[in-house]
Image (cartoon, rainbow, N blue to C red):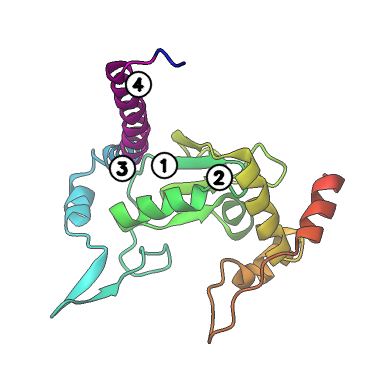
Amino acid sequence: ISSTTPQHFTNNLKSKISTMSFWRMSKKKTVILIALASILSLWYDQGLIISIKDRRLSLNKGNGECEWVAAIQYTDPGFPTEQDFKKTIIAGYPGGDKRITFIQLEGLTGLSARDEWEFAFLGMTNQPFIKANYPHHEGIWGWQDQADQVVLVVSNIKKAMIEYHDILWDIGYAQTFEEAYERMDNLYKDEVAGVPHENPPVEDFLVWRDLR
């Protein structure tokens, strides 16, 4: 016979709810901290802050209609090529949600991110956010000395391993930068004309996992 009293049960329930709320709030706080780090890293440039303040994630066309606007690329007119940014490396395991992180930073600032391999093979730019897998063997120290701080993205390793294989499968297990770059359009495809994007067979994942 359980000796748990109704009051004891209520207290336990409140404790569990409090713990769950804490973790939900922790995730929210993490997003907020990343946002603040992004803004603060650019805070010293008054002109840039003014442009960020005027930045919008979409164009308001009225009547409830809007148009999504991409972050400005280094080749676009008006990109701040001479600004002295405090650049941020977004580092993590391949497939570990780095893309989600830098997309948030792009949305907050209107400035695009760049991959470590692009710095190494396509040349240096003034883009302030650097997506990196280094020191994993899929990464490379391509940004030279153009970084000042790091955001380390830590994801569930089991989920990351599957996502990592999905990426490799989409680009045909490319072995060089040139091969991967040619097949980039195969990544992150959505359903097109009712035809779903193909997922890697489980058998392919198991063969790759065991070889690793």
Lower position in the chain sequence, tag 3 or tag 1:
3
Q: Hey, what amino acid is under mark 2? A: Trp
Which percent across, then down, holds residue 77?
33, 70
Look at the image and say whether residue 15 sits in the magenta stretch: yes
Disc 2: CA contacts within 10 A as few (<14), some (14-19) or many (>=20):
many
Q: Is residue 175 visible?
A: no
Q: Earlier in the sequence, mark 4 or mark 2?
A: 4
Name the residue rendered at 69%, 47% in the picture: 138
Give the Cα separation between the discs numbered 3 and 4: 35 Å
> Which quadrant of the view contains residue 205?
bottom right
Dot 2 corresponds to which residue? 143
- Between circles 2 and 3, the one closer to the viewer is 3
Quadrant assignment, res 60: bottom left
Q: Secondary structure at mark 3?
A: helix
Q: Which residues are magenta?
A: 4-31
Q: Real-space Cα distance between discs 2 and 3?
A: 22 Å
Front in this rendered view, residue 117 or 205: 205
Query: Which residue position is annotated with label 3?
Result: 35
Compare marks 2 and 3 and give the one earlier in the sequence.
3
Q: Secondary structure at mark 4?
A: helix
| Residue placed under numbered mark 1 in the picture | 87
Give how far across and how far down residue 47 sits, in percent.
Answer: 19, 50
Residue 118 shown in magenta: no
Identify the mark at residue 12; answer none if there is no mark.
4
- Callout 3 environment at 10 Å: few (<14), some (14 to 19), or many (20+)? some
**Contact? badges 1 and 2 (CB < 8 Å):** yes
**Between marks 3 and 4 in the image, the one whose residue lies nearer the viewer:** 4
Secondary element at tag 1 = loop
